[in-house]
Amino acid sequence: MNSKNLEKLSLGTWNVHTLYATGALMTVVSAIETYRLDIVAIQELRWTGSIRLNNHTKFYSGGINHEAGVGFIIKNVILPYVKNFIAYNDRLCYIQVVWKKESGKKKRKTIEEEYLNSRTFFGIANELTKKRKPRDMIMKDSNNVLITEEKKIAEEFREAFKQLLRKTVDTTEESITYLTAKPEDKIPSKEKIEVPIKMLKNNKAPEEDLIILSELLKNGGQKLIPLHLIFIDFKQAYDSVQRTEIWRSLKLLGVPSKLISMIRVSTEGSKCAVKFGHEKSEEFQTTGLKQGDALSPILFNIVLEMAVREAHVYLAKKTDKESVAQWSARLRDLASKCGFGTELEVVMRDVFVVGMGPGRVQDRLLEEDASSQAVTLVKLVEIATNKEATINASKQWTAG
């Protein structure tokens, strides 16, 4: 392995939990080869002693009781450059890899000697010329005219991103109320704080979810267990969110108005600019959620939660075992978790009739004039209840 390859070492770290299990080491080595890692720091090996495989070598630091332990797994081609390895304890070890960086003069000499080897020749040639000035960029503007100036190109990108990132702005937004204190926001009790803490996954990091998922896929395929996974990729997710929906969703979920105001102050008025080469375009205002903001994923999930709740209302259906009263009560419970506002009456009335399903009760409800203000949800429930009672009485009379 020459020094050129050593200049591009790939390093990694992995808490493997244990290698003291059948096939565990080969699984880890296979993953290391998949990600093309050269040196990997390993924690919690639990497998004592160092071992040399076909293409890798395991260095171990720890006790002899198969507990804890740390170490390294490195490619064998790097072994000549390993000058020192010190095993301190089951938590700490040290490895020293030393090589001499090849100078540009030596590279030029090598390229002269290897002119017959096209792979080596062009590889070193590209490395020696990679610091050259990049070529000029040319693009067409909106008038189909070629432009080469970085400033003009940056402005063209600015217009493109402005159309892409800036959606229709809802002008009905309420004015922001800047609050520095809110007496009615009481300090939550210890019991209320303990509830969300208990809902958290204990001692689990997000990376472990991916490991669990990969194990499910592997074991499910081996044992022929049917698995159903769904991945949703929202197109322009953050840019498509209306900010009025964010504030409405936060209010419906009971977020204090002080926090909502703070979020609005940090979100509204956001601007972007395009940097091309050494030039930067003028700023333009954006809508939706800010890219790269730590708060954006949470706000997006909140808006999505409210959308899912409303979808549950629109897709609700009356079951065969439900009475009209039970169907009406369940529909009201679903709608109470949403924010339909002034449209609540119309939405519940329509869903009540459509979700009733085909039958004599629905046929009777469709006879009413939906455009009449007198046809309220209460009246429709009364009509449906009476029709249901008539049908049940008719069935009992026929059975008798």
Image: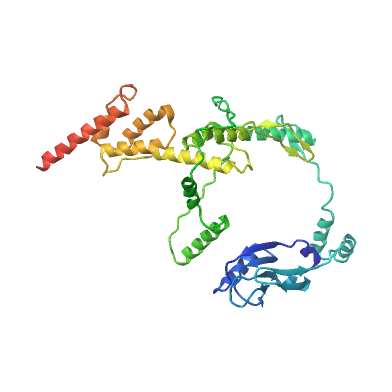
How many numbered circles does the render carry? 0
Q: Position of residue 237 (x, y in %)?
A: 56, 40
Residue in the image at 39% along x and 36% along y: 335
x and y percentages locating residue 384 in the rendered image: 25, 32
Placement of 112 over or under 388, stated as above or below? below
Q: Position of residue 198 (x, y in %)?
A: 48, 52
Q: Position of residue 164 (x, y in %)?
A: 62, 35
Question: In the figure, 127 relative to 350: above or below?
Answer: below
Q: Is residue 393 visible?
A: yes
Left or right of 285, for residue 223: left
Query: Which of the two residues, 215 or 154, is positioned nearer the viewer here?
Result: 215
Left or right position of 224 against 42: left
Instruction: Between residue 259 and residue 242, name the one nearer to us.
Output: 259
Nearer the observer, 138 or 243: 243
Q: Where is 23 relative to 333, above or below?
A: below
Q: Residue 42 lies in what quarter of the image?
A: bottom right
Q: Residue at x 51, y 63 (%)?
A: 215
